[in-house]
Amino acid sequence: MNGAADIHTVPPTDPSVDVPLVVDIDGTLIKSDLLIENFFTVLSSRPLAALGVWRLPLRSKAWLKSYLADKAETDVTTLPLNQPVVDFLLQEKARGRRIYLASASNHRLVQALARHLGFVDGVFGSDGTVNLSGAAKAERLCRQFGGQGFDYIGNDWVDFPVWRACRLAIATNAPPRLVRRLKAERPNAVELSAPRGGIKVYLKAMRVHQWLKNLLVFVPLLASHEVNPRTVVDSLLAALAYSLAASSAYLLNDLLDLPNDRAHPSKRNRPLASGRLPLLQGALLAPILLVLATLSGLVVSMNFLGVLALYYLITLAYSLHLKRHMLIDVLTLAGLYTMRILAGSAAIDRPSSAWLLGFSVFVFLCLALIKRYIELVGQLRANKGNPKGRGYRLEDLSILSGLASASGYCSVLVLALYFNSPEVHALYSHPTLLWLACPPLLYWISRLLLLAHRGELHDDPVVFAATDRTSLITGAVMLAIVLAAI
């Protein structure tokens, strides 16, 4: 039997209600970390102000928390709460116990969270000089309540000095090794169960389903008809590198967009926004994936690595700034999709057709505009007003629909012109047959526009297309036409 199973899994029942109950915040009361949260909030909204953390070696951690609390505009009402802990606190409050928050986070944020909860009797938090963590927190609570004069709920190794000083030690959301250690020191310790994520949470945070987009890396390989073992291996490595880099960028984007994601009806369920994946783990996973992507890219070629680096820099600029500006955001997304085709060309050392790149820009601009359109439709139907963190308003719905339609139909026109180009006539035995691919594409784009208008489309049209039966059949028909033309 492991340590976690040895810990009691039900709240303690004590006839005395005179002993105050003290609860930590980061990772305990909330499924987040306010220090990391504040840093990424400042980095997202005021990047230059975030550079001020370089002064940390000259100051203290308490100063850093105060500095970030001053610069960030953290909305504590949207923080993901650890519901089992909240339920337990409400249960104990109903019995007449006094509830206190004691956190190493800045005292202003602790006070704001206490006001939001509405049932807290007092707070303890860090100020600009004292970091209320570990031994400092234990000393402060003993001075206030006396040794063994309070119960304490925590989740981290730094909580051990407080657990040793309290009457009853309660753990939640803690790693099994910590629970075993706590049980060894405090046999009467109690564990409040909290749901654990597992590997599926990491995969969802990495948005592995979005790796389908990186199949675009294979387009130059197929379009050039240069299929051989070397080009196939290089294209596979390029797709892997792009997938790892994209996952790193997704994690970084989610860290920078936490407040807006939590205000979104579906994005609030993302692992980082919902607290199912700890922010620190997400912040560490992003650079690890980027390093792995770089190593994979080095195996392919320096030209490919250069395209990959440019893609990541543009993605970073998008996450930090460009996504807040109307039209610039969708043009950037269309460009990022097109860069996948350029990366595929660099991987096999073959130039891409200008017609093919033009088609990519128009078709992915169409899909990006549809994505923004359905986000506005979701906001409208939920009566939530204009979306936060975007440059669009509800009254933009009609123009977005028109722009998406124009861009989509332009992509079909460019594709038709590509089919009539000398390059195609040199590659295909029956190039005239390729014109038959235009009607299915027109049908698919028109259908997406209608589904978006009805509110029946997933918030990512590319992912929808990869799982939609009609879209898959349409793609198969177009592929059969291309094969027949070879």
Image (spheres, rainbow, N blue to C red):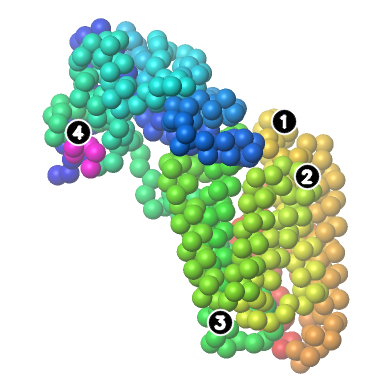
**What is the secondary structure assignment of the residue under circle 1?**
loop
Pair 1/3: label in front: 3
Residue most extreme to the front: 58
Residue 56 screen position, x and y as percent: 48, 35
Occupied quadrant, residue 432? bottom right
**What is the secondary structure assignment of the residue under circle 2?**
loop
Disc 1 or 2, which lies upstream in sequence? 2
Q: Residues within 10 Å of mark 1 (few under 14, many from 20)?
A: few
Q: Against 368, is 303 above or below?
A: below
Residue type, label 3: Val
Q: In this orientation, which residue lies closer to the viewer: 66 or 25?
A: 66
Disc 1 or 3, which lies upstream in sequence? 3
Disc 2 or 4, which lies upstream in sequence? 4
Disc 1 or 4, which lies upstream in sequence? 4
Give the residue pinned by disc 4. Answer: 182
Give the dominant element type of the magenta stretch: helix, strand or loop: helix
Residue 435 screen position, x and y as percent: 82, 79
The residue range painted magenta reads 177-182
Q: Quadrant where the N terminus lies?
A: top left
Q: Quadrant where the C terminus lies?
A: bottom right
